[in-house]
Image (cartoon, grey):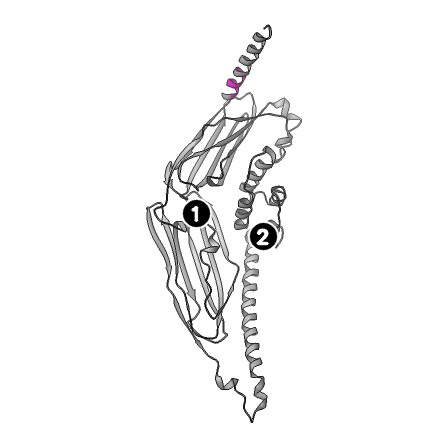
Amino acid sequence: MNASPGRALLLVMAVAAALRAATDYSYTLHLSKRSLFLKEPFTLTFEVNQTDPSKVMFFDFGIKNRDAFSIHRLDRVVDEGYHARKERYIYLLYPLKEGKLTIDFDLLVRRGNDEMLSSAFTGGRYNVKAVETDDRHEPIPPATVSVKPLPVAAALVGRFSMERSVDRKRLHAQEPLYLTVRLRGVGYLPDIERLAVLPPIDGVKIFADEPQIRTRLTKEGTEIDATFRYALIAKRDFRIPDLTIEAFDPESERAYRLQAPSVAIAVEAADASSLLDREESPQRVGSPYAAIERFFIYLSVFAAGWIGGLLSGRLRGIVGVKRKSDGWKERVASCKDARMLLKLLLEDPQRFEPWIVQLERALYTGGKIDFKRVKREVLHAC
């Protein structure tokens, strides 16, 4: 019985300390949209300001429920004012489910003082964890959005255009025809490799080049520029089937189609006389080998073009972004877990900061992460 007053006093002191801690910072949260369509982009901006000048404070903000949203951090701005730290986070989100969705947040506040940090703080970006601070996950009320279903079964959500071209419509047997499909626009990035797949064509051999997909995150959505190239070889006339992609623009609430009509290709057969044996010219028996030789010549030409395109793409990557090695994508693809991927991305922390933050939070705070999704996003960004 005598211990009850002591326990009550401790409870009161704990509540008072919590109330004091809650007054040492302020924050604002803003959503660009509250009602939107499935896979329609919106931005979330979170600003937090230190209000207690007697402390040294650090913040780390994130979004928890990644199963309901595709989440990309666009920016993090830090004002390291002396005892007056300010941080702003901007995220791009796509809702992946319909109905009323809740967005849950995680705000980690690290508190210290000059005496505590003077001997431990090293100034490095990844050395904050070595500092002895009072770390607390502060409660932030969740936000909600209302997500409407798409009025059509759309494979693309956003504003897109499509172009399809062939280098010619008449060719010789076993001569390659080059087909190019290009998708461009702003919106939600789906499994885009499947959208422009050329279906099998009877009597036609199809060789597919590696797709070239470039993306850039913006407040309006993901800018996408994807090019698909094919080489087609046939012995007789054929038709390239039409290509139709259903799309929806949530901004104008308009359903539309991206269409490429079918194309008839005329194939000129080889000269029959060149394939016939002549009694007076037995050496013509070797002519079938010439046809095989021509086939491999055309195949080698296509392979050379494919290799040339691959090398030029890598050279552009080296000029635009100084990668640690030519096999960067292969190194990312070979990563088996989050720790291995994080170690690789830290070789270029400025370029891969959004994914570094996600991996660090999962590894060091015990949070959950969709490793396959993160790895796929990094590969698209390479």
- Quarter of the figure that contains the N terminus: top right
Dot 1 alpha-carbon crowd within 10 angstroms: few under 14, some 14 to 19, many 20 or more: many
Q: Residue 359 sits in which quadrant?
A: top right
Magenta range is 16-21
Residue 100 vertical position relative to residue 218 in the rendered view, above or below: above
* Image point (61%, 31%), residue name: 128
Q: Position of residue 303 (x, y in %)?
A: 56, 67
The reply to whether discs 1 and 2 touch (Cβ–Cβ < 8 Å) is: no
Q: Which mark is residue 369?
A: none
Using residue 260 as the reference point, say whether residue 325 is left or right of it: right
Between disc 1 and disc 2, whose residue precedes?
1
Question: Dot 2 corresponds to which residue?
Answer: 329
Q: Nearer the viewer, residue 55 or 336?
A: 336
Q: Which residue is mark 1?
A: 188
Kindly indicate the quadrant of the structure image that contains residue 374.
Answer: top right
Q: In terms of depth relative to the viewer, which is nearer, 107 or 111?
A: 107
Q: Counting other residues with Cα less than 10 Å from the Cα at mark 2, is it few (<14), some (14-19), or many (20 or more)?
A: some
Residue 102: x and y in percent read 43, 33
Coordinates of residue 139 in the picture (x, y in percent):
49, 26
Specify the principal SS of the magenta part.
Answer: helix
Quadrant in which residue 10 is drawn: top right
